[in-house]
Image (cartoon, helix red, strand yellow):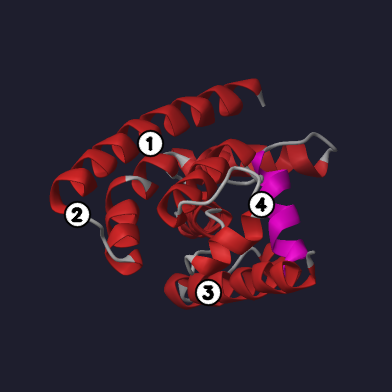
Amino acid sequence: DVCSSDLQTTLASQANKALMAISRFQKKVGYLSCNDFFKIFDAMVKPILCYGSEIWGVTYSKIIERVQIKTCKYFLRVGRNTCNNMVLGECGRFPLQLSYMSRAVKYWCRLISLPQCRLPHQCYLTLKSLDESGRITWATHIRCILFRFGFGFVWISQEVGDIGSFIALFKQRLSDNLAQDWYSSD
C-alpha cells in the first residue's frame, strides 16, 4: 500500500527526530545503561513508530524495523553492516513487529466484540465479505496472521473470549515464532 508506506516513512522520520533528542540528552547526562536507554526508547520512540498500527500493522514493515535496528547499532557503537539479528539480540530486543501486529489483532478483537449496530463493526463485516469474495482487504491480512500463528479457529468462530488473555497468548506465540526465526537464521 502506497498510503501505508508513506505513513510509515513519516512515522520513521518523526521517530528519528525523537532519537536525536535522546542522543542530545545522553550527551548531557552521560552514557546510559542498555536498560535505561531502551526504557526511554520504548517511552518516546516506540509509540511514534507504532502510531496507527491497528490499521497498517498487518504486514511486516521494513521502514519501521529499520529505526529500531539503527538505534541498536548506535547504542552498541557498531558498524552499519553488523548483523541485524545480532544487534537486536545483544540489546535484548524483539522486532517491533511483535508490537504492531499485536495491536492490529487486538483492534480486530475489539471490532468483533462490538454490537452489530455499531458502524465500525459494520465496516469490518464489509471488509470480511470482500475478503470472502477474493478481494484483499485489512480483514484478509488479519485472517492470514491468525492462521499463520495457529489461531485459524479464532477466525472461523469470530470469537476470542477474554480479549486480554487472547492477546497475551497471541503475543507469546508471535514472540516464540520470532525467536525461532532468530535461532534458525545465519
**Where does the image place residue 53, in percent across and percent down from the top left?**
49, 43
Q: Is residue 180 left or right of residue 41?
A: right
Q: Earlier in the sequence, mark 4 or mark 1?
A: 1
Label 1 to label 2: alpha-carbon separation:
21 Å
**Where does the image place residue 4, in percent across and percent down from the top left?**
58, 28
- The image quadrant of residue 63 is top right
Residue that carries the numbered disc 3 in the rendered image: 166
Residue that carries the numbered disc 4 in the rendered image: 142
Secondary structure mostly taken by the magenta-highlighted segment of the chain:
helix
Magenta-highlighted residues: 138-150
Asked if the stretch drawn in magenta spans residue 176, the answer is no
Q: Is residue 10 left or right of residue 86?
A: left
Q: Secondary structure at mark 3?
A: helix
* Kind of residue sitting beneath label 2: Gly
Residue that carries the numbered disc 2 in the rendered image: 30
Give the crowd class for mark 1: few <14, some 14-19, many >=20 residues within 10 Å: many
Label 4 to label 2: alpha-carbon separation:
44 Å
Q: Earlier in the sequence, mark 4 or mark 2?
A: 2
Give the crowd class for mark 2: few <14, some 14-19, many >=20 residues within 10 Å: few
